[in-house]
Amino acid sequence: MTQIALSRRAAVVTVFTGFASRLGAQPRAQGSKARVAFLAGGNMEPISVRTTIEPFRQGLRELGHIEGRNLTIDFRFAEGRYERLPGMLDELLRLDPDVLLTSGPRPTLVARDAVKTVPIVAVAIDDPVQMGIAADHARPGGNVTGISAAFDGILQKRLQLLKDVLPGARRFAVLFNPDTAARAGIAEAVPRWEQGLGVKVLLEAIRGPGDFEPAFAAITRERLDAVAVLADSMIWTHRAKLGALCLQYRLPSIWGGGGYLDAGGLLSYQGDWPALYRRGAALVDKILKGARPGDIPFEQGTKLELVVNLKGARALGITLPRSLIVAADEVIE
């Protein structure tokens, strides 16, 4: 993953946050409030609240942590502008949290480099060992634990689903943000996808909305048949523009979460986001009760969801296989 350069101010905060002797939160005295910081790369729009924030809050409530009574949660959202993350992390650390929850790979990498003593729960990330935030899945060590959304073989399965919809398709694009998912890691898997599926795969990096039009121009030149879009906070924030481009260029697309499909995407195959954040609440609870994050095994998401967008199919003039619709966990009419 890309190393994140942090501001001097954020580095200084790491030393002076008052947590020098604490890698696990001390159990709170009765009647006092715990404080949880929540750092995300996306935004606090209704669908984000429904799929991530409210499941996290609900999970905490079920474990006895009630906002306003014995819990305070401080939220910061970068709205897809990753350069804002170090400053937002700085703000959260100055609030003296007991636990920091990082949502997604990029906020987690920023926290990894700046926070050495505050307990961190990282949710919806890639492989924590490959990211350099855990020594081992079973015993992470250090101050970070969490739950991964990196399902083995999921990208190949997404391409297979596109082939099921488009039996004659043989050329696919994978759109990704290289500031979150390193090109080298994806490129390493491309020959396996191509051989296993009998297709050609083109990688297109997009760091921001200014890269969208050039990427689709390249896809058109290469006469590609469909697009797989990797989940990312920047992409989430600008999904409407990306979805519109998929429709404009008549490209069926598969995404990393059902929430992306409201802008014209065709399919989604990804982990159950609400379940991930409810489990994140359980890990926060363990730390608030005194557990050390380095002793808490990293968890792996266990449920994958297929979402089918019939409205998007109609806009593209595609008839989806009945078997795919029946197999879907959710169908958008």
Image (cartoon, rainbow, N blue to C red):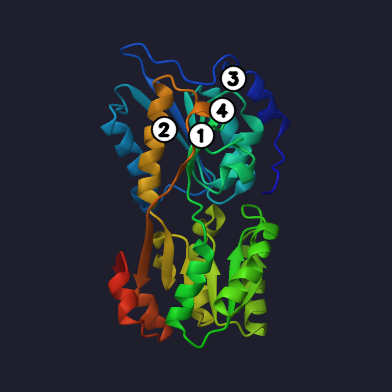
Identity, as a three-letter code, of the amino acid under mark 3: Thr
At which x and y percent is residue 25? 47, 19
In space, the residues marked 1 and 4 are separated at their CA atoms by: 7 Å
In space, the residues marked 3 and 1 are separated at their CA atoms by: 20 Å
Q: Residues within 10 Å of mark 3 (few under 14, many from 20)?
A: some
Residue 309, picture quadrant: bottom left
Q: Which residue in the structure is indicated by mark 3?
A: 17
Numbered disc 1: secondary structure: strand
Numbered disc 2: secondary structure: helix
Q: Residues within 10 Å of mark 4 (few under 14, many from 20)?
A: many
* Lower position in the chain sequence, tag 4 or tag 2: 4
Whether residue 306 appears in this view of the structure is: yes
At which x and y percent is residue 94? 55, 23
* Lower position in the chain sequence, tag 3 or tag 4: 3
Identity, as a three-letter code, of the amino acid under mark 4: Asn
Numbered disc 3: secondary structure: loop
Q: Which residue in the structure is indicated by mark 2?
A: 283
In space, the residues marked 1 and 2 are separated at their CA atoms by: 8 Å
Q: Which residue in the structure is indicated by mark 4?
A: 143
Q: Which residue in the structure is indicated by mark 1?
A: 145
Identity, as a three-letter code, of the amino acid under mark 1: Thr
The tag on residue 34 is none
At which x and y percent is residue 109? 62, 41
Numbered disc 4: secondary structure: loop
* Lower position in the chain sequence, tag 2 or tag 3: 3
